[in-house]
């Protein structure tokens, strides 16, 4: 399906002398710097996605003191919605905006249909509801998109860029750049707009915020929409690199959760820092030790942080 | 006195039970009942789903033609969801409750290994659709177990001989950490010395991993002349993409587990030049007309395409061959498990989708490495490489 729309570089680039080990095959001198830089590039890219997911966790935590375990599924929905939109109408900007918009609606619906009816129960019940929501969304996605993986074309071609001894795809830059832009916009929103300030007020003290006339339940709904949008943006950015498949969200959600805890739950700076650190740690572990330890590293860090510094690196509200 | 009365009652009950036991097969003797166990849903459904559909398609086709020598065929298909425990329960049910004459499936190596314990004990012929060698060997403990999928042993032998022919002797291997990848790793490292290959790097990746650049970076530092990747699902396509990103220009060989049109679609322009061993179904249109498998592959692909509006896959082909040989055995042997087993074992020169089968008491797979051809991806399509 996607294959028809895929951009292909001109024939001259595609012909590669495949079966002859090129002269450079023996000429590369392996210093330690090259691989390390490569691990860093790959780690920062994954880390940027973890950071976006961690921010989503933080926003909802600040508004409601619950952890929304459906956050990872929003990433998956973002990727798959954008891929489907791109198949309908092959324009990447439209697919990006459309994907984020659709998933924002999904986030609002999750809050309205699953969490609002149960708002008076204890936070732990609400958290379990989000777990149920995650399973439900995943199942729905499986029946809609099937179990196959889909691909989204990279935003600006697939000619690798060279950064000293390391290489990266233009898409890596897109992930890092748009990730940074989204974080900056988010900070501006929280610091400069009335709605953002109202949300922060709710985060500090919900009862006091209510007393001064801030509609707290509206803010909760808003926080779900916003964090869904963040997750979707992450999913669409990473889709050209990792493919989109219905079960991609669970692991990403858990990694984002680790990142949020590592940085300090509820802190924006902490989320970003936690995400990037986690991404780099994973990449170094799989490159230098063994790829089997990749996922273990994330959860090992989570445990260490929970034992020794439960408030996280930056000290959120955990 | 009281206890003697109890004994009489118990004997009576036993007699009743054994009566119903004895009469059950007699009542069900009408159609030929065969079972199927596939991972039709769950993470491995890309294997089980086409197998299930193929078996259903063939059963309908046979019954529409009036059955096997006039006897209709009844097919009972169970879904194990890729879970060994469920597969075992389904096998127990098919063997003891449905009293099937034979079972086709399961789709995976782990599920096949537990199901064959049940069928081997109950002396029910089982034709597995999974790849690993240990499903049919050692032969003296697998009298009732057959399989139609090519083994990874053949695929590895085929790749090594191809690379060797191109003057390549230093390879890096990158395998997936699932049963398919582990089996591939064992074969690759095991056969390398005999094939004159040196494995200079050995890395792994997880089924759900989305970034293999760290592993590939460390492989790149060891300067292999070729990289061999062994995995299933979407991840091998990412390996291809990541290799392109890192500017690694040595040949990449993938396993037969990646040989599908979907792989080309997912890997995009990174797919060009990739080598893989593939069953002949993938490229049957390119085969010469005198190839015995060409007609079978064509017939299967066209039938499947017409019914399900999707191209046939080599995975479904395993079930196609299993059903084909089983139907021949049923024609010859009738409703007798022991005779069906013998008939299957005597299958000779059966041109199937996965290869030409020559079964023997020592070899219940019956395929040779030439069941694989090495294909190379060029311009978004497979082409014969040698």
Image: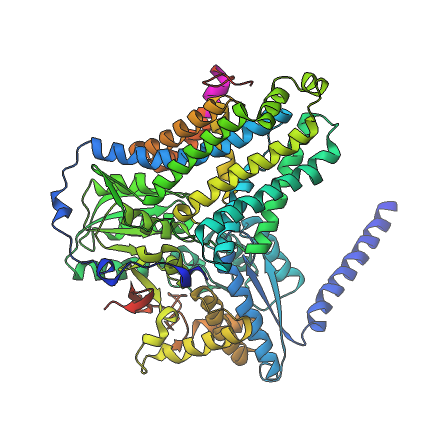
Q: Position of residue A304 (x, y in %)?
A: 45, 20
Q: Position of residue B301 (x, y in %)?
A: 45, 74
Q: Position of residue A199 (x, y in %)?
A: 61, 25
> Quick check: can you spot residue B88?
no
Image quadrant of residue A297? top left
> Quick check: can you spot residue A3?
yes
- Image side of residue B384 versus residue B365, left or right: left
Question: What are the residue bounds of the magenta stretch?
Answer: A302-308
Identify the main secondary structure in magenta: helix
Q: Give the vertical position of B348 relative to A14 (above or below).
A: below
| Residue B147 magenta | no
Q: Give the vertical position of A33 relative to B128 (above or below).
A: above
- Image side of residue B101 versus residue A274, left or right: right
**Residue most extreme to the right:** B1
Along the line of sight, which residue is nearer the eye, A85 or B234?
A85
Q: Position of residue B209 (x, y in %)?
A: 41, 43
Instruction: Name the image quarter holding the C terminus of chain A.
Output: top right
Residue at the (75%, 64%) spot, across then down: B20
Query: Which color mode does the image show?
Result: rainbow
Along the line of sight, which residue is nearer the eye, B376 or B351?
B376
Image quadrant of residue B64? bottom right
Residue at the (35%, 58%) spot, across then down: A7
Residue at the (43%, 49%) spot, across then down: A243
């Amino acid at each position: 399906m996607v294959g028809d729309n895929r951009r292909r570089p001109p024939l001259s680039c595609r012909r590669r002398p495949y079966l002859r080990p090129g002269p450079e095959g023996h000429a590369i001198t392996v210093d330690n710097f090259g691989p390390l830089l490569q691990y860093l590039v790959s780690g920062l890219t994954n880390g940027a996605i973890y950071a976006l997911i961690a921010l989503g966790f933080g926003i909802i935590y600040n508004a409601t003191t619950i952890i929304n375990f459906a956050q990872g599924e929003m990433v998956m929905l973002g990727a798959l919605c954008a891929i489907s939109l791109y198949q309908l109408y092959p324009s990447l900007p439209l697919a990006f905006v459309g994907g984020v918009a659709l998933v924002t609606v999904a986030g609002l619906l999750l809050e309205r249909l699953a969490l609002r009816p149960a708002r008076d129960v204890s936070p732990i019940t609400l958290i379990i509801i989000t777990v149920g929501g995650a399973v439900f969304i995943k199942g729905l996605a499986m029946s809609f998109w099937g179990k196959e993986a889909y691909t989204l074309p990279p935003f600006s071609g697939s000619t690798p860029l060279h950064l000293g001894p390391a290489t990266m795809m233009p898409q890596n830059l897109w992930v890092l750049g748009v990730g940074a832009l989204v974080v900056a916009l988010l900070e501006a929103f929280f610091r400069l707009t009335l709605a953002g300030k109202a949300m922060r007020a709710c985060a500090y003290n919900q009862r006091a915020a209510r007393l001064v006339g801030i509609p707290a339940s509206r803010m909760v709904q808003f926080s779900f929409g916003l964090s869904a949008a963040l997750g979707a943006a992450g999913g669409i950015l990473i889709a050209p690199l990792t493919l989109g498949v219905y079960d991609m969200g669970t692991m990403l959600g858990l990694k984002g959760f680790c990142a949020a805890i590592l940085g300090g739950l509820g802190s924006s700076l902490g989320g970003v820092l936690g995400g990037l650190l986690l991404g780099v740690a994973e990449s170094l572990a799989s490159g230098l030790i063994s790829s089997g330890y990749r996922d273990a590293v994330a959860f090992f860090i989570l445990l260490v942080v929970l034992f020794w510094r439960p408030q996280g690196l930056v000290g959120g509200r955990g | 006195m009281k206890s003697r009365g109890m004994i009489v009652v118990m004997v009576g009950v036993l007699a009743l039970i054994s009566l119903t036991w004895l009469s059950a097969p007699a009542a069900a003797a009408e159609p030929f009942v065969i079972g199927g166990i596939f991972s039709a849903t769950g993470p491995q459904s890309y294997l089980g789903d086409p197998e299930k559909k193929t078996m259903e398609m063939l059963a309908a086709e046979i019954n529409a033609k009036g059955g096997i020598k006039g006897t209709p065929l009844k097919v009972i298909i169970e879904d194990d969801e890729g879970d060994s425990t469920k597969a075992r329960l389904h096998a127990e049910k098919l063997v003891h409750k449905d009293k099937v004459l034979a079972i086709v499936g399961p789709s995976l190596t782990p599920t096949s290994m537990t199901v064959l314990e049940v069928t081997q004990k109950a002396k029910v012929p089982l034709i597995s659709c999974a790849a690993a060698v240990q499903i049919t060997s050692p032969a003296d403990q697998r009298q009732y177990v057959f399989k139609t999928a090519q083994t990874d042993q053949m695929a590895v032998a085929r790749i090594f001989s191809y690379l060797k022919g191109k003057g390549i002797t230093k390879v890096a291997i990158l395998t997936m950490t699932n049963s398919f990848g582990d089996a591939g790793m064992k074969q690759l490292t095991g056969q390398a010395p005999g094939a004159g290959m040196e494995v200079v790097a050995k890395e792994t990746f997880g089924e759900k991993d989305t970034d293999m650049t760290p592993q590939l970076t460390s492989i790149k530092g060891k300067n292999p002349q070729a990289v061999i990747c062994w995995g299933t699902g979407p991840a091998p396509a990412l390996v291809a993409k990541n290799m392109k990103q890192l500017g690694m220009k040595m040949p990449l060989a993938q396993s037969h587990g990646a040989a599908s049109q979907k792989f080309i679609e997912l890997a995009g322009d990174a797919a060009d030049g990739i080598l893989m061993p593939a069953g002949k179904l993938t490229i049957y249109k390119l085969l010469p007309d005198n190839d015995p498998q060409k007609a079978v592959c064509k017939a299967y692909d066209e039938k499947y395409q017409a019914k399900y509006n999707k191209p046939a896959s080599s995975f479904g082909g395993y079930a196609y061959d299993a059903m084909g040989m089983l139907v021949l055995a049923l024609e010859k042997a009738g409703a007798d498990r022991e005779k069906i087993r013998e008939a299957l074992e005597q299958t000779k020169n059966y041109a199937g989708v996965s290869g030409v089968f020559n079964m023997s008491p020592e070899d219940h797979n019956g395929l040779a490495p030439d069941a694989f051809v090495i294909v190379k991806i060029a311009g978004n399509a497979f082409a014969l490489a040698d």
